[in-house]
Image (cartoon, coloured by chain):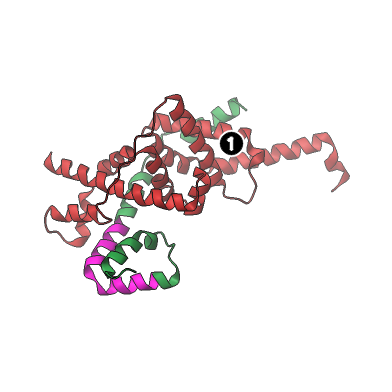
Amino acid sequence: MAPSESEPGVVAASEARDRSGFEEEALTHAEHLYRIAVRLTGGQQAAEDLVQETYLRAFRSWRSYRPGTNLAAWLATIMRNANLDELRRQSRRPLQEPLDDDGDYYLYNRLAQAGPVPQDEVLARLSGTAIVSALADLTPTFREVVVLVDVGDFSYADAAEILGIPIGTVMSRLYRGRRALKRALADRTAQEGAA
Amino acid sequence: MSADPCRGAESMLQPYLDRVLTPAEAARIEQHLRECSYCSDRYIFERGLRSVVRECCCEEPVPVGFVERLRRRCSDQA
């Protein structure tokens, strides 16, 4: 180490540079986090507030981030905790997770029942509104894992770290969450068809 | 895979789409999908469903000035 780097002023300047570099890099993930936050909270204003709270916390504890590790996952962990704190503050409790045993092809079978169509048109029966409201209706435990993996594109390992649960639990929640999502989509699509 | 190849394929479809199967398991399901139109129709649907859900959520417009407001709030409170 060069002698001048041990001088307090130089160290402070170097730390300020590190911090500012960290903040700039962290901010490149803001839009990705916002899209996850919208699905977690169900509203644009709530999502913006959640992302702001996330960045305030992240910037306060920036020294605990290890450079070279997955920054998006580190930020998502903070966001998930901030969201939990908010849910607790509002004392909303997760509902019981419904069981369903309709199989993985439940949605496909329901959509295909609506009438014979070419295979590639079955998906076209799903509207964006149905997808958004079906995601919003999942219980928080399922929603967060489905949103992280299927919307946020995080790996099982990242999701496990973010949620503080084993990978096996991520897999079983994903399995059940995706089924619950398909069930909700089938119900919404049927309602839209009837309307 | 279980005795009923279609049931076996159903249970492996999500892990296959998540790319977490071993190469041998992936090869088995790919072989089945080539041979079975019932399962391959459903595979195509499940794959499409994933991208439709992702696209729908990723098209969510970020509010105008969002990153700037975020930057300002953070520097105000630093």
Please identify the dominant SS of the magenta region. Answer: helix
Q: Residue at x 72, y 38 (%)?
A: A15
In the rendered structure, the colour chosen for chain A is red
Asked which quadrant contains residue B51, the reply is bottom left
Chain ID at mark 1 = A
As drawn, A111 above or below A45: below
Q: How many marks?
A: 1
Q: Secondary structure at mark 1?
A: helix
B3 with respect to B67 (left or right)? left
Quadrant (top left/top right/bottom left/bottom right) for the C terminus of chain A: top left
A157 with respect to B12 (left or right)? right
Mark yes or no: residue A148 visible: yes
- How far from the left and from the top, in percent, is residue A182? 27, 49
Residue for badge 1 = A58
The residue closer to the viewer here, A21 or A84, is A84
Residue B27 forms part of the magenta stretch: yes
B38 with respect to A48 (left or right)? left
- How far from the left and from the top, in percent, is residue A117? 14, 59
The residue closer to the viewer here, A77 or A128, is A77
Q: Residue at x 39, y 47 (%)?
A: A146
- How far from the left and from the top, in percent, is residue B11? 33, 61
Q: Of the residues shown, which amino acid type is indicated by label 1?
A: Ala
The residue closer to the viewer here, B23 or A101, is A101
Q: Which segment is the magenta one?
A: B26-48
Asked which quadrant contains residue A98, the reply is top left
Residue at the outermost front position: B3
Q: Residue at x 42, y 25 (%)?
A: A91
Which chain did the image draw in green? B
Mark yes or no: residue A123 visible: no
CA neighbours of label 1 inside 10 A, class few (<14), some (14 to 19), many (20+) = many
